[in-house]
Image (cartoon, rainbow, N blue to C red):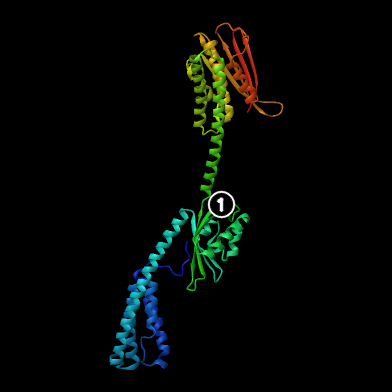
Amino acid sequence: MLIRFTTLSPLSWAASALHAAGAVGAAMLVRYALDPLLGDELPYITLYPAVLFTAIAAGGWAGMGALLLGMAATFGFLSFDHGPAPFSAQTLTGLGIYLFGGAFSVVAASSLRGAAARLEVAQERLLTTLEASRAGTWRWDFRANAVDWDPALARLFGLDPAEAPRQRGDFRRYVHPDDHEHIGRVIDGATESGSTVDYEFRAILADGSLRWMYNRSRLLRDTKGGPALMVGACLDITERKRAEERQMLLVQELNHRVKNTLSVVQSLALHTRRGSRDLDSFQETFQARLMALSATHNVLTRELWESASLEDILHAEMIPYGGLDKGRVSVAGEPIRLKPQQALGFGLALHELATNAAKYGALSVPQGRLDISWRAETDAAGQRRLSMDWVEQGGPMVEPPKRLGFGSRLIERTIRDELGGLLEMRFQPEGLRCSLNLPL
């Protein structure tokens, strides 16, 4: 709350009447005390302050009541002490002056109260706006070297308004030491040039936390052209700074991922071309691998590229081969999440395994089955690792290949070289058994 010398709250009729009566009574007691000195001269002199004070403190109607009550009391005083003096020309002239001057004082006081009330509302609105926008204002008097913060700025720095800095040197305690020199140069330059300046700095709050502040200030000169005042506004921009840092990191990460993805696509295109008999087979195989890469990208995008669920990747890669809903593929395993680079490589490896199963293995015949299971393990060094078993059964008779195709080599290179894992592929007559193990 703002600190005020008076509270301009409306009073009840009874309180206003008591206020007027008390002020007039005090004024008449003073008049009685001064009667040996004044006689019947200036009978209303002590009532002017009473009427003015009542109008300021209790309002215009109370001031008018005090004005009339004072007139009646003064007439009684003159009648009681001075005989017919109340009806003399001198007394009536004084009465006229009193009524005119008193009424003018009441009107002026009422206007001042109205202006003060409007200023009070404007101050409250400004303070509420500043606090809602996490901002505050300040003023620096060059001659007195005095700094004045509004309550919103004090609370912005985690201070009670009574604890706000009073001099420029006090403010330095709330500025990061690395920013002292920068702020000093900016303020000195603004003092010399008189221009409006903007700068950012790190503020150390009362609880020791660090916040970013934006300040805009301008200089006011005196009649001789010298610096008189500097006024400014301070805004907390910590969230904006954090957003800028996050955006920068995201741009860098996106650039890194795009380069990696293009490198993967280039490698896929090169090796797919080498293993393709003709352009049609190249297009079919290459497009399928791009779709597999895209499926993993979609899973990562839903998770904001922070990590991806292994089961979600498996679902996405098995969609082109019937998915996991038709009873031919069973999956079992605990929830495990992979980092983005792990997810991309793992998705390509699963795609190649699923493609081989659909062309030559268990998924190439109706009675074939595929069982996929995984678990998290801890090795002797205390590192968590993913262990997965891919087991095909019920498909055509399997014979070990005389040479590995690009798909098998891609699986091996991805698991071993890119992900630093272990791979074992056993081509048993009843079906392929693939075991892989990689660090999490």
Residue at coordinates 57% horizontally, 16% vertically from top-left?
Answer: 274
Q: Is residue 126 above or below residue 97?
A: above
Residue at coordinates 34% horizontally, 93% vertically from top-left?
Answer: 82
Q: Which residue is mark 1?
A: 211
Q: Is residue 334 visible?
A: no
> Regarding mark 1 in the picture, which secondary structure is present there?
strand
Q: Is residue 289 visible?
A: yes
Q: Could you tell whether 427 is left or right of 12 in the image?
A: right
Residue 408 is drawn in which quadrant? top right
Q: Is residue 265 above or below residue 203?
A: above
Which residue is at the far top? 397
Residue at coordinates 41% horizontally, 64% vertically from top-left?
Answer: 120
- Circle 1 packing at 10 Å, graded few (<14), some (14-19), many (20+), is some
Residue at coordinates 56% horizontally, 69% vertically from top-left?
Answer: 145
Quadrant of the image for the C terminus? top right
Residue 42 is drawn in which quadrant? bottom left
Q: Give the percent coordinates (x, y) of residue 437.
A: 64, 22
Q: Nearer the viewer, residue 85 or 402?
A: 402
Which residue is at the far right? 380
Q: Give the percent coordinates (x, y) of residue 199.
A: 53, 56
